[in-house]
Amino acid sequence: MDEHNCGTIYDELVEILNQLELGWIAEQVEEILTAGKTVEEMVMGRKSPDLKLAYYSPQEQLSMLIDAIDRTVISGVEMEQEIAALLDNQGLTTDLKSEICWHSTLAQTGEFVKFYQPEILERLAAAEQVRKTLGKLRVNSAKNPPSLLTEIKGNLEAIVNPNLRRYQQLRNLFNCYIFNILVTGAKNEGGKVSYKDVTKQATDRLIFRQRPGKIYEQIQPYTHGLIEFANKPPLEIHIGVKVHGRLRVLYDCDICVLYKMEADACRNNGREPRASRILLGVNCEYSASQLQPEVAQAFLSLASELRVAGDCYFVSNSVSEVAGKLLASRKRKWECGIIPGDVNNVHRLMYGFQTIFKDFQAKS
């Protein structure tokens, strides 16, 4: 397709996203497009020491928007399926219901999102069709774009979960997806995982915070996972808690694994967990577009300040060559492109988590 056609299709896709209340996807892509990209020029067959700023071509812009739709809407349905499967498996041996509530600290009530596998599988089939149609738009051989766009809009309407369409909702879903990978890793290393509320009572429903808060807060019966390895100190896994940093500053921790003894002390004394008693901290970055380098830089500062007892991980559904370069140069634990479709990336992350649990058992 020529530049004019690419620009027209791009605008049509943006309009479709706006109509489906998914305009935030296009907005995040626009931020990247406006910032431009860094390029290295070749001089006499060698890379120039100077970097230059360039802007994306219409073809690149369209490709980025298509990637963003795949990374969020389609992968979102795939994450729902992964979570539904885990909840169903847990339900075979426990009373755990196939639903999750993300609750705001300030709100009086929260809405439970049901994860019903047959319904999700139907949407998953439609999602695969959207992926194929978007692939046709991406290549130059695409014919009759108007009919393809009509097909995309119809299928997108069919696959979008009305309770999981806003950015914060999908970000919470991603955090839960990483939580499940961590739980699976603990089980693979011989751990027994059960779910408790803030009063340490067994629960049949998963209730998580929308944003990081107090681990001891009893406004809602927030859920955490109890991980027990044979003859080892028990651990707890939490989503969205504040943690106590080295400079007496509280930081957001999207997911953390800490010693149960420390969690009990926090609940009894009304204080935040100390970083020195955290086995694993995970910073989850959910994005429709490529990762900005500022995100990686912020994580590097956070990891340096927290100094957890074990490891600090940076995990994202998105990718970025620049962000990866920054994280790798500081020798930090990181994984990007964590979506159900990228099986190798997901397995590598899970094995990384398993190594932490293996070392924990060896040292304890």
Image: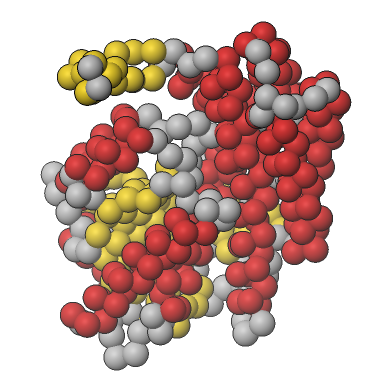
Q: Residue furthest left?
A: 247
Q: Residue furthest bottom?
A: 231
- Percent position of residue 183, x then y: 46, 70
Q: Is residue 206 left or right of residue 320?
A: right
Nearer the observer, 117 or 155: 155
Nearer the observer, 153 or 170: 153
Q: Is residue 9 left or right of residue 262?
A: right
- Percent position of residue 60, x then y: 54, 22
- Percent position of residue 221, x then y: 53, 62
- Percent position of residue 4, x then y: 67, 8
Location of residue 25 by image quarter: top right
Quadrant housing the N terminus = top right
Seen in the picture, residue 304 relative to 176 is either above or below; the reply is above
Tell me the residue at 78%/33% (across/down).
152
Tell me the residue at 78%/52% (across/down).
125
Seen in the picture, residue 54 relative to 123 is either above or below; the reply is above
Seen in the picture, residue 122 relative to 20 is either above or below; the reply is below
Location of residue 256 by image quarter: bottom left
Tell me the residue at 28%/53% (across/down).
333
Whether residue 225 is visible here, answered yes or no, is no
Location of residue 130 by image quarter: top right
Whether residue 94 is visible here, answered yes or no, is yes
Nearer the observer, 32 or 244: 32
Tell me the residue at 40%/61% (across/down).
348
Seen in the picture, residue 33 relative to 227 is either above or below; the reply is above
